[in-house]
Image (cartoon, rainbow, N blue to C red):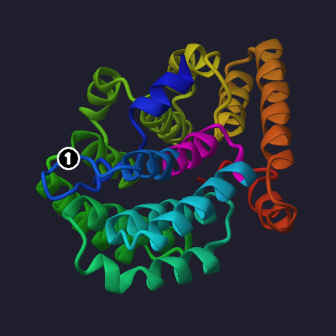
Amino acid sequence: PLVVALLGEPLLQVGPAVEVVDHRGLPAPGHQEHVRDTGRGRHLGELERMQGHYAAALAHAAKAAVSFRDREDARGQVDVGLLQVQLLLDLHADADAARALSALGPALAKAPSEQQAAAAMLEGQLSARRGDAGAARRHFADAARRARGSGVLALQLQVAVHGGGTGELETQTAILGNVPLRLDWLERTMARALDGGDTGGAVAAYRKVQPLLRAGDYRRAWALHRLAARALAAEGRHQEARVAAAAASRSWDAVLAQLPAERREAFRRATTSGTTP
């Protein structure tokens, strides 16, 4: 099921939480459970994000941020900070996302390569949103270099997908088994096919999407269904296009209902008619 896949492979996972130990190297009494709870809050935030439950995701992230700060866990603070930036980007709160990412700068200077790679990827997304293609390419190249240094395959593929990679990513994302990453790739495959006039290719990618979406809620289901509706209509398959369009409307409404009230208007303006990631 989708939930198991998400819990098993969060997209911005940058390493396990560090246990507090006593002088014998054994977990200190009371601390192991606290660390586990803190890490769980961050992972629950990622899970809620992937399902499009944004108010819950932001709440889990905020709670985890407080816990990491109270424990003076610098790595944990950066980890949850990166999640908060991604959440703001998802909600098209770009100015807030940029400020939050900038605030992480001092901590990122001392962070491990996987966190630096995730930050560079977010910078690339922000640059792309601003229409600065040159800056986006530079940030994604930096993210790719740092991701290779981390040795984390899921992160390397995530950077490649967001950075516009093609070719072998179809096979690699299928083999990895990371459902959100696979859906991310298939959405980009569909968009690229439509842009190139390959409506059949877009429909073929949608056929791969459909069984994955049956497993549970997904934050970008509305975009995938919208792309499919366009492709199916262009192919003359009008009944299937209407079904896809209705699914897009339902899933978009569901995500909108899960947004904090103060974030709804920006999300609505950015996503009412298009599929901008």
Q: Main secondary structure of the magenta part?
A: helix
Q: Position of residue 183 (x, y in %)?
A: 50, 32
Q: Is residue 183 above or below residue 131?
A: above
Q: Is residue 62 above or below residue 187?
A: below
Q: Is residue 149 visible?
A: yes
In magenta, the rendered stretch is: 41-54
Q: Is residue 1 left or right of residue 36?
A: right
* Mark 1 element type: loop
Residue 225, quarter of picture = top right
Residue at 41% x, 50% y: name it.
30
Residue 53 painted magenta = yes
Residue position marked by numbered label 1 in the rendering: 26
Q: Front-most of 84 and 168?
A: 84
Q: Front-most of 23 and 267?
A: 23
Residue at 35% x, 55% y: name it.
163
Q: Amino acid at mark 1?
A: Leu
Q: Front-most of 136 and 27?
A: 27
